[in-house]
Image: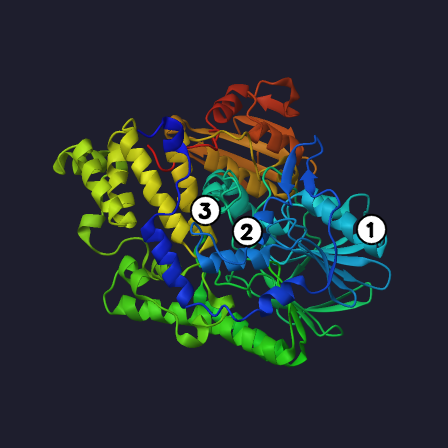
Amino acid sequence: MMSETDELAPKPATEHTRRANAEFLLGLPMGDRRDFDDAARGFVATLEDPVIRRADGHPIHDLTDHDFLKESEDAPDTVNPSLWRHARVNNHHGLFEVVDGVYQVRGFDLANMTIVEGDVGIIVIDPLSGTETAQAGLDLYRAHRGGRPVKALIYTHSHADHYGGSRAIVAGQSDVAVIAPEGFLYEAAAENVFAGTADIRRGFYMYGPALRPGPQGQVDAGLANALPAGGSSTLVPPTDLITKTGETRIIDGVEMVFQMAPGTEAPAEFLIHFPRLRLLAAAEDVNHLMHNLLTLRGAQVRDAATWWKTLNRTIQLFADDTDVIITQHGWPRWGSDDIREYLQDQRDLYKFIHDEALRLTNLGYTMTEIGEQLTLPPGLDEQWYSHGYYGTLNHNAKAVYQRYLGWYDSHPANLHKLPPVEGGQRYVEYMGGADAVVQKARASYEDGDYRWVAEVLTHVVFSDPTHRPAALLQADALEQLGYQAENATWRNEYLMAAFELRHGVTDLGRIDLATPDVFAAMTPEMLFDFAGIKLNGPAVAQTSATIGWTVSDEPDAQFLLELRNGVLIYTSGVPLDTADVRATSTKSDLADALFSGRPFGDANTGVTIEGDRAVLEHLFDALDDFPLWFNIVQP
């Protein structure tokens, strides 16, 4: 009889999983060792104390957590052999010299921080996801290269792991140029604030920070071994926006040529060429893997057509003048001929996914059918940098379908499906009750039919969340799927679901990308946008009121807010005299009043009020709080 402790523990690989992983190994080009050499090249040093901590001493990233990857070149039974190899290549951390005067900090975070030396100072590209990792990286660089001042901070694109540590980079300096692509600030807020709570919660499944690192747990995050958990996210607003391809900047004697790449890997993104260094900084448009067209944590669907065309333009602009390419994840590549082939293959990868997905769409296949059919042509499949460690052919093909046709597959049975709980109750009743479904699912599990077990038991779990045998068997099936996955984020998704089915949701405290520093970088319009998102429309559906709000530390920032039909409308540049209530505050006090969670009557709001105060209290009372730890695999 298995004890409850045994039932909740990770299980070994089954014979079906061992066989699946052994067969997967047979098709891999394991003799190609170049990535191992390139990832280690130029190593300078790493941290003497391998644990990066917050100011209060709480550890957010232990660089030794993935030392188990060094124990064996051969993958354990519980890890796909391709993913094991990729995780081992990712398992480098510290300061690396790329070429003379260019350094990267790798392995401290999900992203890399690149440092380019100028005449007297440095240019920092992408300051990681939090102040702690950025500070650790900058300190390591200065310990080995001296205390050069920061002359410029560059954001290649609008994802949080590429801007969150910005305050650490500019601290104590007032003359730092902050360069970003046009649209950066809005897109950073739209993805990381407006949908930030759902993004973070889903990101826990995608990156698996709650899983124990090891062969039965978290092995890799695709772009790096792991994402730090619980760092301090900040955002220094850009002072210089790049708006078109071909724009140049010379900072501290370093010439940079920019190529705009909006709508590729991020809505706002650019690549940077350094002519004198013959170096291309490719942001996240080129990677040592297949990237996501729709990330599992959730984001806007990315345009594979724009992506391949951008890379085609990159080849035309820079390939003849480039001897080294760096990306903001992973390791560099050296050699002009190799770089051209690398760029061409990455271009071809996204064009193949785009065109094949649409070809099959126009033959009448649905997104699920398309995802099951696609395989890469041999010329791409034999390259490690085309493998799906982060994106996959399966879900990227679905993203192409979704971008062009949306979620609906045109079968009316899927037009207005029952919600999971109601649908699950009916499925289980039709199939003879929960116990009967679980009994049949056990037989399917023994046959290695894990995808079907996971699917069918979802109905039982949502129809009766107290049915532990169903939840535990579904966890076992998901775990085996995770053990077989080549994709790091798929593995984490499966294993996180198994963990929560066994143990429930673990509240790890508040984790927030919408911090006061990020609010300070947002415009008043963006703050009102977020207030409209947090507004509980049904609660104020019968309310009609007007509010005049003056933001005292912003030029010409007067807004008429209208509460009507369950929405918050704002308009600038109109008279406020007739408003039911008028308020004046700084931008930071506006953000504090809207999003601190304190009652509006709190004396610390810093808002001056004239008129009917009750209107404001009613508005603020109707702003929802977004709890982070909502259920995902259970109702």
Query: Can residue 286 be seen at all in this image of the molecule?
Result: yes
Residue 479: image x %, image y %?
A: 38, 44
Q: Which residue is mark 1?
A: 143
> Which numbered disc flags the more N-terminal residue, 2 or 1?
1
Residue 633: image x %, image y %?
A: 35, 37
Label 1 sits on a secondary structure element that is helix
Q: Is residue 58 above or below residue 77?
A: above
Residue at the spot x=61%, y=69% of the render?
A: 259
Say which mark, if any, is on residue 187. Answer: 2
Q: Amino acid at mark 2?
A: Glu
Residue 306: image x %, image y %?
A: 48, 67
Say which mark, if any, is on residue 386. Answer: none
- The answer to the question of whether label 2 and label 1 lie on touching residues, with beta carbons closer than 8 A, is no
Residue at the spot x=46%, y=58% of the render?
A: 81
Q: Amino acid at mark 1?
A: Ala
Residue 326: image x %, image y %?
A: 64, 65
Q: CA distance from mark 3 to mark 2?
A: 26 Å
Question: Which of these two is toward me, 493 or 299?
Answer: 493
Residue at the spot x=30%, y=59% of the render?
A: 367
> Which numbered disc flags the more N-terminal residue, 3 or 2?
2
Q: Which residue is mark 3?
A: 492
Question: Which of these two is toward me, 561 or 293?
Answer: 293
Disc 2 crowd, CA 10 A, few/some/many (<14, 14-19, 20+): some
Q: CA distance from mark 2 to mark 1?
A: 35 Å
Question: Which of these two is toward me, 201 or 151?
Answer: 201
